[in-house]
Image (tube, helix red, strand yellow):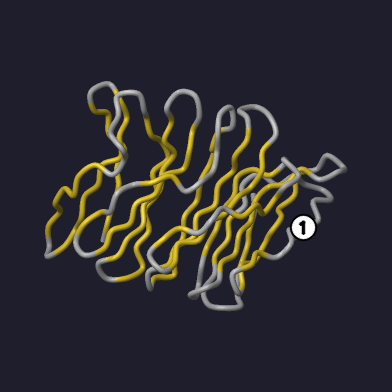
Amino acid sequence: EQVDVKSLVAARVRVLSARYASGAWSETGALDLETVSTNVSAPIVVSRGAGEAFAAWIQSDGATSRVYAAVFVNGGWGTAAPVDQVVAPEQVLTIALASPGGGEAHLIWSQGTTGGAQGVVAARYAGGMWGGPQALDTTTEGTYPQIDSGAAGSAYAVWLHLDSDAVRRVHASRLADGTWSASQAIDPGVNSVATTPVVASPAAGQAFAAKA
């Protein structure tokens, strides 16, 4: 099992990690790229296979915020690297991470200008590397994305989307055969406004979504 914690070190916020194995916890070091001008937030870690874990977080250099990720294999964390293609003044605002195991993981995030337009983007880790980001919501009105994966090669994503009638509804997309489906509204949103969508996939071809 793995766990990441956010810690204040030398007046900066860093991503530190610890591992529980053989009945005891042990530190496994810092995951983020150490520079005096960066800070991190929103660390997430998932582990679905023995000796395998994925971690992701938002890392800011003051000008822009990006999503970084690291992979735990062969008893140690690999070098962290950015997954997105964000450039200033855009920012990564929220992230979510899922893994079905077997050396695969899925990241999703919202990006845009703070207080302005936002989009939803996803990337898949397979074959020992992260694939290129794929836009799931290109209308610049997507927020609070969530993702889950119940089987290798598949994933389900949900997020909030501001529709043309000015109502925020839950939209969804499915990853199959390496391609994300077109965004689809799964929330009628007639008498309510969605705020916090979640999704879970117990197996290939199945998923459940809920909202508050």
Task: Identify residue for label 1.
Answer: 185
**Nearest the eye: 48 or 211:** 48
Q: Secondary structure at mark 1?
A: strand
User: Is residue 61 toward the left or the right of residue 209 in the image?
Assistant: left
Q: Residue shown at 37%/29% (left/top)?
A: 39
Q: Amino acid at mark 1?
A: Ala
Rendering coords of residue 148 (x, y %): 52, 63
Residue count near mark 1 (Cα–Cα under 10 Å), binned few <14, some 14–19, many ≥20? some
Please identify the quadrant where the N terminus is shown: bottom left
Rendering coords of residue 7 (x, y %): 27, 34
Rendering coords of residue 189 (x, y %): 79, 51
User: Is residue 91 toward the left or the right of residue 2 in the image?
Assistant: right
Rendering coords of residue 92 (x, y %): 54, 38
82 is higher (above) or lower (below) than 181: above
Q: Residue shown at 68%/47% (left/top)?
A: 160
Residue 112 occupies quadrant: top right
- Extreme-bottom residue of the structure: 204
